[in-house]
Image: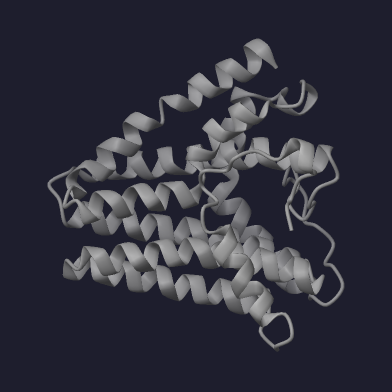
Amino acid sequence: MSKLPKEYQFIDLSDYGRPIARIIANSLKSTRFTPVDITIAFIISGLIGVYFIIEGYYWAAAFFLIFKSILDAADGELARIKKTPSYTGRFLDSVSDIILNFIIIITIWQLTDVSLTLALLAFFGIQLQGTLYNYYYVILRNRFDGDTTSRVFEDETPIALLGEKQKNVNILFFIYKVLYGIFDKIIYALDRSASEGKPFPNWLMTLVSTFGLGFQLLIISVLLVLNLKEFIIPFFIGYSVLIFVFIFIRKAFY
């Protein structure tokens, strides 16, 4: 089930795991497993991937990082299939992602000669990349009546949906704002009029989708398998330059 109407769907290069995610979600639709259970599973998969990075088993690390990406899509798929969207799941997903991203980058820093400053800069760049992708994607989803659990501007605590507790939403939203607030503000400052412009063309969204977490994990996995872990942090620093390129294209033509 797509998050966008057919005419606005684009090739999402970060969403390569969606077909398998749908199989997983469909296999669980009649069980007691919830989307939050799947989110917890992807946290575990990500941590196992980190363990294998530390141990130097890069093929195994790549498998679990990519499997984490697949499960990251499966929790949302299961929520849509069971018709149980929740802000608890939405914010738990995002909070888990940023913490795992930080752990992965710090782990790679410890295993290479790259400075901590560059590692933190790479982490900052990764989060800005993901924020721009999510910003544009959520604008499309909200504009064309797609999935609307995510909001363009996360500036107020949402009201809990049926089946979830407001207390859990409040806590997770607070953590989300602490962790993501700076990135949201920076991207909004760089392109505050994005939600008012023309619909983004599919080709631009495909390019921006390389900023998605799934694609980022794929790049990390490939570089690990090729035994090029020392290039991971410099790559993401350099790749962050495209943030300004994509925003320029959006502003100039759309």
- Does residue 168 lie above or below 154 as drawn? below
Counting from the top left corner in percent of width and height, residue 231 is at 21, 41
Rendered residue at 16%/57% (across/down) = 111
Q: Is residue 11 left or right of residue 53?
A: right
* Residue 172 seen from this side: no
Q: How is the image coloured?
A: one colour
Residue 45, quarter of the rendered image: bottom left
Q: Residue furthest bottom?
A: 32
Count how many numbered circles sit on residues in the image. 0
Counting from the top left corner in percent of width and height, residue 150 is at 73, 51
Q: Is residue 33 left or right of residue 140?
A: left
Rendered residue at 51%/63% (across/down) = 70
Q: Is residue 15 left or right of residue 198?
A: left
Counting from the top left corner in percent of width and height, residue 153 is at 74, 41
Rendered residue at 32%/62% (across/down) = 62
Image quadrant containing the C terminus? top right
Residue 60, quarter of the rendered image: bottom left
Residue 1, quarter of the rendered image: bottom right
Viewer-side residue, 122 vs 201:
201
Q: Residue furthest left?
A: 113
Rendered residue at 76%/66% (across/down) = 80
- Does residue 125 lie above or below 148 as drawn? above
Viewer-side residue, 156 vs 32:
32
Viewer-side residue, 223 vs 122:
223
* Residue 53 seen from this side: yes
